[in-house]
Image (cartoon, rainbow, N blue to C red):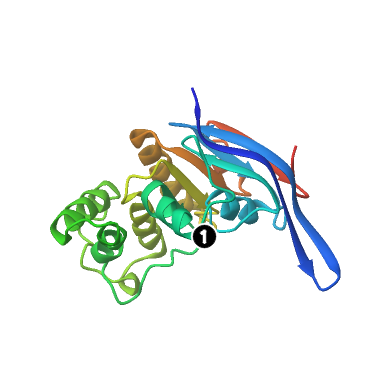
Amino acid sequence: MSAVLDIQGISKTYRQGTRRLEVLHDVSLSVSAGEIVGLMGQSGAGKSTLLHIAGLLERPSDGEIVIAGRAYAGSSERDRTKVRLAHLGFVYQFHHLLPEFTALENVAMPLIIAGSSTHDANKRASSLLDRMGLSERLDHRPAQLSGGEQQRVAIARALANKPDVLFADEPTGNLDEATADRVMVLLLDVVREQGLAALVATHNPGLAHRMDRTLTLKEGRII
């Protein structure tokens, strides 16, 4: 099966005055449609940096990012923004929901930005939230939801535009163990149902065990 996400020889170096901080060193990996790959590693190993680069939120110092057969490391910001909106989904440790909007509005927003009508966006958002077990919470704002419910809304938002690749950075890191387990099971089930390629960063071996395969990042290298 061909890779939907292909990370080729990625390196990332930051400059702090005269000092060079090498965060990633020649990292390569690929993820196919319908495959969930776990990315393990301690804090500071470079997991978040790798996800940001793979998700076109940050540029590598060297290497290439290929998504659905097209290379993007050197593409314009305009093209990268279009790809993120249409083909990539993101779930973070903290939900980053807009507090003044309801759950339905938070999920519908990326659809409307992408050009869907309000009616169609709300219909898709309602369907996703129902799949997340939140059909009774459509009109609730984030402050009225539990931590697990907020993260489920964030997952629904990430899936709104039917992405080809889902990136999740410690998606349950801010939840208690029982809630984290429920949210992760739901996330993985929905990803498999929709046949997405998913790269999920976590430091939790129990959660990583649920994925199709796991890679370990240590000191900026895949080991």
Q: Position of residue 189 (x, y in %)?
A: 38, 38
Report which residue position mark 1 lands on: 93
Q: Is residue 52 visible?
A: yes
- The answer to whether 57 is drawn above or below residue 11 in the figure is below
| Three-letter residue code for mark 1 | Gln
For residue 67, side relative to residue 155 (left or right): right
Compared with 117, 132 (above or below) is above
Please state if 50 lies on the left or on the right of 178 as rendered.
right
Q: Secondary structure at mark 1?
A: loop
Quick check: can you spot residue 135? no
Q: Please state the total of marks drawn on the protein image.
A: 1
Asked which quadrant contains residue 29, the reply is top right
Q: Position of residue 126 (x, y in %)?
A: 20, 54
Please state the horizontal and vertical placement of residue 203, each as a whole percent of the image. 63, 49
Q: Picture coordinates of residue 187 (x, y %)?
A: 41, 45
State the quadrant of the C terminus.
top right
| Rendered view: 93 above or below 196 | below
Closest to the observer, 193 or 11: 11
- Residue ID at (35%, 49%): 159
Q: Quadrant of residue 185?
A: top left
Which residue is painted at 38% across and 58% down in the image? 154
Q: Is residue 29 left or right of residue 85?
A: right
Q: Is residue 86 left or right of residue 18?
A: left
Residue drawn at the location 51% of the way across and 56% of the way down = 76
Using a 10 Å C-alpha cutoff, classify the residue at mark 1 as few (fewer than 14 neighbours), some (14 to 19) or many (20 or more): some
Name the one closer to the observer, 24 or 65: 65
